Amino acid sequence: MADELSSVSAEQRFSEIAECREAYGRIDFTRTRAAAENSFAPIFVTGLPRSGTTLVEQIIAAHSGVESGGELGFASYFCRALQVERPGRPGDDPDPDVVAGIGRDYSKAIGRRFPGARHVTDKSIYTFEHIGALKLALPNARFVVVRRDPRDNLFSIYKSRFAQGTHGYAYDLEKLARYYDEFERMIGLWRERVPDWFHEVSYETLVADPEEETRRLIAACGLDWEDACLNFHERAGRVQTLSVFQVRQPITSASVKGWRRFEADLKPMIDILREDGHVAE
């Protein structure tokens, strides 16, 4: 079973998110914010795997002023410099110099990959755990959280074949539901503490009304409107994702409510989602 092959267990991931939530919950985000040292303004796109993050990143990266970074992987690494009480985890009362250092280190790392770029998208998978810390360190940064009906989202994860050593929760319906709950609780913390620091995109709303939602998205990223963002699928560029075929096509609602055909098989997962209040039906 794929879960048995994972070097990062589901329980380890649940624990990591819970510890981040508890630690960041102790931070007063009204202080300790670094001063912007330059105009660099990365755009972080985050959400669960298979939620539409690649689609959203490609829409943003179609803008002439944006470089597409993909899953850069630097953000979580630098955020671990905030460790205080627990090694490898953020703590309360972060040192302002450490916060500023995170911003400088991240900016330098991106600058080496994309010299001179002001806006670079970063779709690193665990960014949703560190929104607050990254905003403290990178005041000009923008954050986009992509959300999708959990039944479609988790079913899509369940059907996917991820690289060995990743996503240990992906092939167990009950663990999938629990992972979604951990994600929701983490985003809930950011909604409560720093609601103005990120923009949420509903996948279903995006595919139902692409132009309106794309305009809102581009504005939330601090960018002027360009029609190219609606025609992102015509843009040449490398995409490294399981979603590569979909992002080469115009926006479609074909994958919405795909879970219904398999509702009986997905019942253990759906029951937990319903009990946790994540689905109403």
Image (cartoon, rainbow, N blue to C red):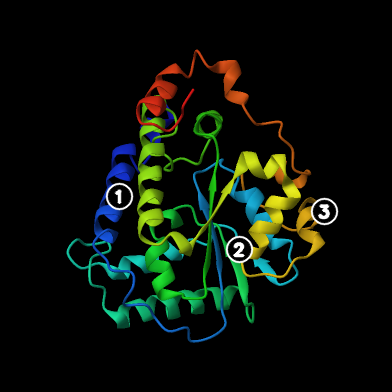
Mark 3 neighbour class, 10 Å CA radius: few under 14, some 14 to 19, many 20 or more: some
Indicate the position of residue 279 as horizontal and vertical percent values: 46, 29
Tell me if residue 242 can be seen: no
Question: In the structure shown, which secondary structural element does the residue marked by tag 3 occupy?
Answer: helix
Q: Earlier in the sequence, mark 1 or mark 2?
A: 1
Mark 3 and mark 1: span between their CA atoms?
39 Å
Q: Which residue is mark 2?
A: 220
Q: Residue furthest top?
A: 264
Instruction: Out of 11 and 53, give the one closest to the viewer.
Output: 53
Left or right for 251, reference 196: right
259 vs 125: above or below: above
Q: Residues within 10 Å of mark 1 (few under 14, many from 20)?
A: some
Name the residue located 43 percent from the left edge and 33 percent from the top edge. Answer: 278
Whether pointer 1 and pointer 2 mark residues with C-beta atoms closer than 8 Å, the reply is: no
Residue type of the residue flagged with mark 2? Ala
Residue 139, compared with residue 173, is above or below; it is below
Q: Residue at x 40, y 19 (%)?
A: 268
Residue visible at 27% across and 45% down in the picture = 15
Secondary element at tag 1: helix
Taking the image as drawn, is residue 263 in sight? yes
Please, is residue 90 above or below residue 118 in the view? above
The residue lying at 43 percent from left, 69 percent from top is 135
Marking on residue 16:
1
- Left or right: residue 235 compared with residue 266: right
Pair 3/2: label in front:
2
Q: Which mark is residue 234?
A: 3
Q: The disc labelled 1 sits on which kind of residue? A: Glu
